[in-house]
Amino acid sequence: MKSSTNITNFDNLISFAILFQLVAVSSKNMLSSTIRQVNDYNVILNQIISVISILIYLRCIVKTKFRVSRSAAMIILSSFTFFSMTYLFNYELFSYEVVVSDFQVFVAYCLPLILFVPLMNDVETFLNNLYKAAYLLSMVAILTFFLVLLGLDTVNVYSMSYGGAAMIPSILLFSKAFKEKTLKDFFLASFCALAILAQGSRWPLLCIGTYVICKTIGNTLKSGKMIFFYIALIATIIILAWIYYIPILETLVLILEEFGLSSRSIKLFLQGKATYDSGRSHIYERLIPKLIQSPLVGYGAFGGVVALDGTSPHHFILDTWANFGIVFGTLILFIMLYKMMKSLLLYDGTSYAELVLIYSCMIWPKVTVAGRFWSEQAFWMLVALYIFRGKCLLGEKKKRS
């Protein structure tokens, strides 16, 4: 029987492997997609991170004695069989740049999650390490924001990559703030969200807002006698925000312009174009008729990109349908949503449920505006967590028998 120390060390080993890659890649993305001087070294930084990550994962494989969860092995085998079958019917599959990129992301970032997360003994260790990683990421997010304010050359007016990466520490630190009721974590999480509003895209704010709303509602319902007080307080905050959000945003625009920073997101809010889709509707108009033409089998692996002849679908649901057909694609989405609800309800208050909520809020709020099936890391993390839970349940049944 393993000692508790050995179990913790084993979980720390896996956590370090996953979180090193998360912190390194997210930090690099925030800096390189925003600051032009760092962007010049983007390729070199990618290569360095890749080599180090491979070495860390190889060490992890040796330490885990080449163990793989049966469910994880089935998913990986099924995925590569699906890729191969699609390629046999479409030899031009990997001629699309987006397909190559998605395949690389799946192999480099999603596959390790499926392989290693189910091998953990307790995800509480992983969650605690994730909180520590969030501090590092928040520092990089804040540093990048201040470098922009200091006048360094930027790559673009706004950065989608910065927003997506800075969203991670924001949600994680909001999670820690709700859990431990710490003002420091709440401040750091809010500052990351403000930095995204100033120089990032809008969908990360949607994910952060969804998480905060879910936790606020959940905590309110658990507050017992204080429930009416909290409801009144939340209602007051919402009403005040609705009344004064325009002058608040206008003031924020003036402050940012003093530093030479123009926020695209804030200006869209002030212009009443918060739901402006940046031309995505035209992409959907091209993709939907093609999905209707092939509702049962779709277009195979990376179907959304293939159907659009190399263009990203910018829509997780439509891309899932393009991969597997409307029928089977809907079934996959339904199973994932069912498992999410089941996990949140049955394991409420546990680290496992908190992780499911965190990663669910990183994927589901944005499924109609962003994301692709094979490269959405939050989605594959959820798959890995559900495999982990299934392994634990199986172990419990064996013990009882």
Image (tube, rainbow, N blue to C red):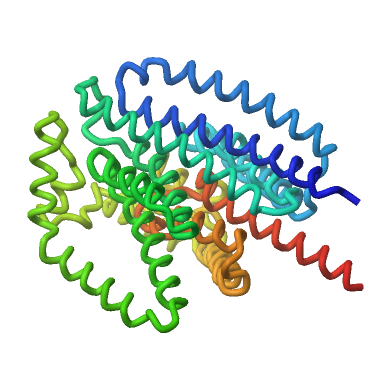
Residue at 44% over, 45% down: 168
Of 161 and 353, the residue lying toward us: 353
Query: Measured along the vertical axis of the image, is residue 293 above or below residue 3?
Result: below
Residue at the spot 57% in from the left edge and 47% down from the top edge: 301
Image quarter of residue 201: top left
Q: Position of residue 367 (x, y in %)?
A: 41, 57
- Would residue 334 be visible to someone looking at this image? no
Residue 185 x/y as whole percent: 41, 48
Q: Position of residue 33 (x, y in %)?
A: 35, 29
Q: In the image, residue 62 lies at what x, y percent? A: 81, 32
Image vertical order of residue 158 relative to residue 346, above or below = above
Q: Nearer the viewer, residue 369 or 114?
A: 114
Whether residue 71 is situated above or below residue 168 in the rendered picture = below
For residue 166, what is the image quadrant?
top left
- On screen, residue 240 versus residue 97, left or right, reads left
Q: State the residue in front, 14 or 38.
A: 14
> Going by the image, does 259 lie left or right of 207?
left
Q: Is residue 180 visible?
A: yes
Is 3 left or right of 238, judged from the image as shown? right
Total numbered labels placed on residues in the image: 0
Question: What residue is shown at x 71% (from left), y 54% (from top)?
Answer: 122
Q: Is residue 38 left or right of residue 120?
A: left
Residue appearing at x 46%, y 55% in the figure: 175
For the C terminus, the image quarter is bottom right
